[in-house]
Image (tube, rainbow, N blue to C red):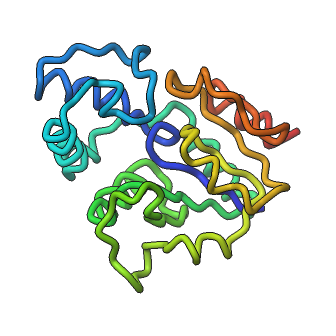
Amino acid sequence: MKFYVDFDDCLCETARAFTVLVKRLFGKDVPYEKVHFFNLQQSFELTDDEYEKLMLEGHRTKELLAYDETPGASEVLNELIDKGHEVFVITGRPASSYDASRRWLDEHGLERATLFCLNKYGRDSFIKNSDFNLELDDYYKMSFDYAIEDSPMAFKFFDHLPELKVLVVDRPWNRECELPGENYTRCSDWKTIREKIAD
C-alpha cells in the first residue's frame, strides 16, 4: 500500500513550537489549545509583516531541526515500511526547507520515507524539474491508499481519490471541522492510526 503523510503537526509538533516562537518574537502568549485556525496569522492575530517574520524564523534550519516528533510517528511508519508499504511525506513547506526537513526525517529514523515538497498553499517560489518538488499536476497523477493529514485546507487534495482512507490527526484547528465523508476518520494519536490501518 501507499501512504501519504503530511509533515507538520502529523510527524512533528510544529504548532507547539510556533507558540513559543510567537511569544519570543512578539510577546504574544497563545496557548497551543487556543490555536483554533490552521491559518497561523489568524490564530496569533499577526500583521502581515509579523506573519512573514514568523514564517521566516520558523523555517530556519535550526528551528526545523528542533521540532519535537509527534509521539509514535516514526515507530508506526517504520513498521509500515518494514511490511513493504511505501511512505511518502508530502509537505507544504517551502522548497528551501527541503534539506533541513530531509535531515529531520533521517535523524528520526525515517531515512526510507520519500519526501516531496508540494506547493499546496501557493506560498512557494517554485523550483521546477527538481527531484523533490511536486507540481500539482504531477501530484494528481499519484495514488495512495491512506492519507495522514491534519489540515482541513488540504482535504481538497484528496478529491481525486474517492477510495482513499484519510486519517485526520486530531488538532485544535480541525476539531470544529465537519469531516468530508465516511472515509475520513479522526485519530487522537499514532497508536490510533496504527489500529485504523490494521482494521
Percent x, y of residue 190: 63, 33
> How many labels, in total?
0
- In the displayed structure, would residue 70 be above or below residue 183? above
Residue drawn at (33%, 66%) of the image = 95
Percent x, y of residue 56: 18, 48
Compared across the picture, whether 197 is left or right of 111 comes to: right
Percent x, y of residue 115: 48, 64
Compared across the picture, whether 31 is left or right of 172 comes to: left
Quadrant where the N terminus lies?
bottom right
Closer to us: 151 or 15: 151
Percent x, y of residue 120: 47, 58
Residue drawn at (38%, 61%) of the image = 102
Compared across the picture, whether 126 is left or right of 49 comes to: right
Residue drawn at (66%, 58%) of the image = 81
- In the displayed structure, would residue 111 be above or below residue 14? below
Compared across the picture, whether 36 is left or right of 3 comes to: left
Closer to us: 198 or 42: 42
Q: Quadrant of residue 75?
A: top right
Residue positioned most to the bottom: 129
Quadrant where the C terminus lies?
top right
Residue positioned most to the right: 199
Residue drawn at (28%, 24%) of the image = 44
- In the displayed structure, would residue 123 be above or below residue 59? below
